[in-house]
């Protein structure tokens, strides 16, 4: 996923900066909302092979 790819749905994704956290993609831009990865979250692959986390 590029830094501003609008074809990817909103959701929690691995931080594009490579930090060990998840960052919220609002469907248009990266936000400042971050969370620590948690085992109860399910990891799913998006269309472009970026990893998203759904609740």
Image (spheres, grey):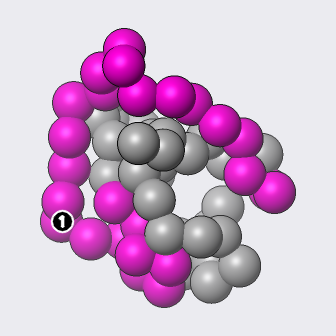
Q: Residue at x 33, y 42 (%)?
A: 22
Side (left or right) of 37 relative to 32:
right
Label 1 CA crowd tier, 10 Å (few <14, some 14–19, many 20+): few
46 is within the stretch colored magenta: yes
Q: Nearer the viewer, residue 1 or 37?
A: 37
- Residue found at x 71% / y 79%: 7
- Can residue 17 be seen by looking at this rendering? no
What residue is shown at x 72% (from left), y 51% (from top)?
A: 46
Residue 11 to residue 21: above or below? below
The residue indicated by pointer 1 is 32
Q: Is residue 16 left or right of residue 21?
A: right
Residue 18 lies, in percent from the top left, at: 41, 38
Q: Is residue 21 left or right of residue 14?
A: left
**Number of numbered tags placed on the structure image:** 1
Q: Is 33 placed left or right of 22 in the picture?
A: left
SS state under label 1? strand
Residue depicted at 77% across the width and 45% down the height: 49
Taking depth in this image into account, of 9 and 32 the one nearest to the observer is 9
Which segment did they paint magenta? 24-48
Residue sitting nearer the eye, 55 or 46: 55
Relative image position of residue 55 (x, y in whole percent)? 41, 42
Task: Report x, y in % for residue 45.
Answer: 72, 41
Above or below, 42 relative to 14: above
Please determine whether, in this image, residue 39 is positioned above or below residue 1: above
Q: Is residue 20 magenta?
A: no
The image quadrant that residue 9 belongs to is bottom right
Q: Quadrant of residue 48?
A: bottom right
The N terminus - image quarter: bottom right
Residue 2 in view:
yes
Residue 37: x %, y % from top left: 31, 26
- In the foreground, 49 or 16: 49
């Amino acid at each position: 996923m590029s830094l501003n790819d609008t074809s990817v749905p909103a959701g929690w994704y691995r931080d594009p900066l490579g930090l060990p956290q998840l960052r919220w993609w609002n469907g248009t831009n990266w936000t400042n909302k971050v969370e620590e990865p948690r085992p109860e979250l399910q990891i799913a692959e998006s269309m472009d092979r970026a990893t998203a986390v759904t609740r």
